[in-house]
Amino acid sequence: MFDVVRDLLDKQLVDADDRRIGKVDGLVLEYRDDEPLRLASIEVGAMTLGRRLHPRLERWAAALERWLGVGRGEPYRIPFAKVRGIGLNIKVDLDVRQTPILAWQRWVRDHIIKHIPGA
Amino acid sequence: MAHQEIRVEALLSRRVRALNGRVIGRIEELRAEPRGRHTVVVEYLLGPAGLLERLSVSISWLPLPRQFAGKRASRYRVGWQQMDLSDAERPRLRCSVDELERVKL
Amino acid sequence: MKKVFEIALGIVTSIGGFLEIGSMATAAQAGAEFGYRLIWAIALGGLSVIFLVEMAGRFAAVSQQTIPGAIRERFGFNFFVAPLIGFILVTLLVLAAELGGVCVALELVTGVGFQWWALPVALVTWLLIWKGTFGLIEKGASLLGLVTLCLVVGAVVVHPPWNEVAAGLLPTLPDHQPAHYWFIVVSILGASISPYLFFFYSSGAIEDKWDASYLNTNRAVAGLGMSFGTLISVAVLVVAAVVLLPRGIKAEDYHELPMLLTPIFGRWGFYLFAASLGIACFGAAQEISLEIAYFIAQGFGWNWGEDQRPRDTPRFSLVYTLTIFVAALLVLAGIDPLKMTIFSMALTSATLPLSILPFLVLMNDEHYVGEQRNGWFSNAVVVFVILLAFVLAVVSIPLEIFGA
C-alpha cells in the first residue's frame, strides 16, 4: 500500500536507466460504478501543471507547444502498469528516447544550445 | 465497461459531504494498492475542512504551548465502498459518519 | 584522511566564498554610520546561517533529495510556485548586484565606467559555468576569495577599541537615525541569510554525493566555515568604523569604498580592496546563477548538473544563460550597484519566510530526514530570526524609501 499524494504525486520520474525524465505532474484515475478507482496513468507536461494552477495556463502551454512544434498540445501519459518502483524516485519501464516526454529538452537543445559553441 | 476519467489533482481538497449534506472534511490523501492487474484506490483520508484547523495542523511541530495547538482536528478514513464519486466534483459519503474510522493526529 | 581534507577544503572555501557585495556594503555602511553598534546584527545573521547551512547539508546527506524538489513534493506544485517565483525575482536582483560589484571593482581599477563592463563580465561568468565543472567553480573562486582576509588583517592592524567591539555584540538601540538603523539591520540580515547560499550548499552536497557518513563533516564545514566568514564581515564593519566614521564618509557611494583600506595599506590597499570586491562578487555571481538554474530544474524534474555537458542538460543550461543575461541588462541599464545591493538585501529579508519556512517543515519531517530531525533550539533560532527580519523589513523598508 502506498499514499498517492505523499509517495507519487510531484515525485521525480526516472527511466529504466535512472535518467531524470520529469516529475509526476498529474495522475489520471478511472472511475467505474461499484469498483474502486483505478490508477490509469501518470501525466507529465507543462499543460498538466498549468491546469493545476489555472485552466487558462493550460491552454497557453498547449498553444505554445503546438506553435513551437514541441508537441501536439497534449500532455504525455505513462500507463501506470509501467511503474516499476515507488521509492526515492518513481521508476518507469520506458526508454525515454522513444517517447515525446523530453520533447522540450530536445527542442531547447536543437534550437538553442546546439548553436552555442562548446556545448 | 464505460469509465470516467478523474484527475487526482482535481480530487484533492474536494469537500466531502455526509448523507445529511454536512461537510465533514476534505480529501487529503488516497491510499492505493495493487489488486490483480491494476492498482486501485482502497481508501480515502479526509482532513479538516476548516482553514484554522488546517493551519493548526501544519504548525503542530512548533514548540508552542498546548493551548495554541488548536482544536483537536480529526481525520476520517473512508473505504472506497463508503465513498460515492459518481459526481467527482461533489463527493458524498455512502454511509453514516459513525461508521467511519476516526484517525487521531 | 580524505574526510579531514574535505573538511579543510570545505572550511576554506566557505571562508573564501562568504563575502560578497551584500555583506561588504551592508557592513561598511553599518560601521560608517553607527560605529560598532551593529556587530550584533552581523553575529545574529551569522548564527542563523550556521544553522541553516548545517541543515541544508544534513538534508541533502540524509534524504538524498534536493530542497526545491522536496518542497514541491511535500507541499504540491501549486504551493511551490510561490517560493519559486519569490526566489527567482529576488535572487535575480542579487545576481545583478554581484555582477555590478565585479563591474565596480573593474571601474575602480581602470576608470572605465561600470556599465561598460556589464557584458564582458557576464560573458566570462557564463563561460566559466558553460565550460567548467562544479568542483572548479566551487573551489576556484572561493580559494581566490581568501584575498578578502586582507580585511581581517586591516581590522587588526588598525587597532580598534576592542572593548567597544565586544560591546557591539550586544543588541543596542540606536542613538540617532532609528529608521535608518533598523533598515541597515534588515539589510545585514538579508545579506547574511541569503537563501541561495544554503540552497547552493545543498545542491553541492548532492553533486558531491554526500551521504549520512558526511554528517560530521557537514557540521564542521558549516560551523567553522560560516563562523570565520562572519568574522570577515565583522572585520569590514570594524574597519569602516575606524576609518570612515571619523571622516564622516557614509559609504553610500561606491567610489568611497576603497577608502576602507587605503589609509591602512596605502596604494596596496586600493588594489587589495578592488581585488577582494571583484573576486568575491565574481564567485558569488557564479553560485547565484547556478542556484537559480538548480532551483528551477530541481523543481520541475529536469536533468541538472554542473558536471554534465550543456547538451545533456539543455533546459538547465538555458536557464542560467538567460539569468546571467537578464541580470547583466540590469547593470547595463546603469542602476547604481550599491543601491541595487542594499535594496536587494532588504528585499531578501522581506521574503525570507517564503523560502525558509517550507524548508524548516522539511527539516522536521521524519519522512525526509528520519532521525536527523531538527532539535527545538535550531527551529526556535531560525524562526525567530526570520520573523524578526520580516517584521523589521516590512516596517523599515517603506520608511527608508519615503524618508530618503
Image: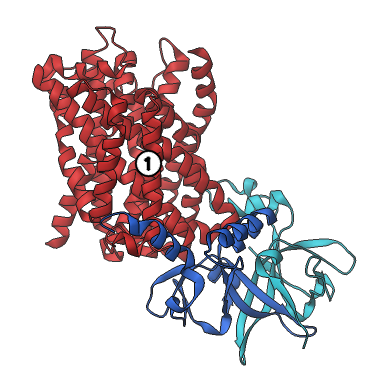
Between A68 and C106, the one nearer to me in the picture = A68
Q: Is residue C331 above or below residue C88?
A: above
Amino acid at dot 1: Phe
Q: Position of residue A103 (x, y in %)?
A: 48, 67
Q: Is residue C145 left or right of residue B20?
A: left
Chain of the residue under the numbered disc 1 shown in the image: C
Q: Is residue C359 left or right of residue C114?
A: right
Q: Which element type, helix, strand or loop, lies under badge 1?
A: helix
Residue C297 seen: yes
Q: Is residue C402 left or right of residue C257?
A: right
Q: Is residue C327 above or below residue A66?
A: above
Q: Is residue A32 above or below residue A14?
A: below
| Residue at x-position 71% and y-position 59% | B48
Residue at numbered disc 1: C325
| Residue at x-position 27% and y-position 11% | C245
For the colour red, the matching chain is C
Q: Quadrant of residue C328?
A: top left
Residue C18 seen: no
User: Which quarter of the image is occupied by the N terminus of chain C?
Assistant: bottom left
Between C315 and C97, the one nearer to me in the picture = C315
| Shade representing chain B | cyan
Q: Position of residue C343 (x, y in %)?
A: 43, 27
**Can you name the residue that lies furthest to the top here?**
C247
Q: Position of residue C148 (x, y in %)?
A: 18, 32
**Numbered circles on residues, count:** 1
| Shade representing chain A | blue
Q: Is residue C308 left or right of residue A93?
A: left
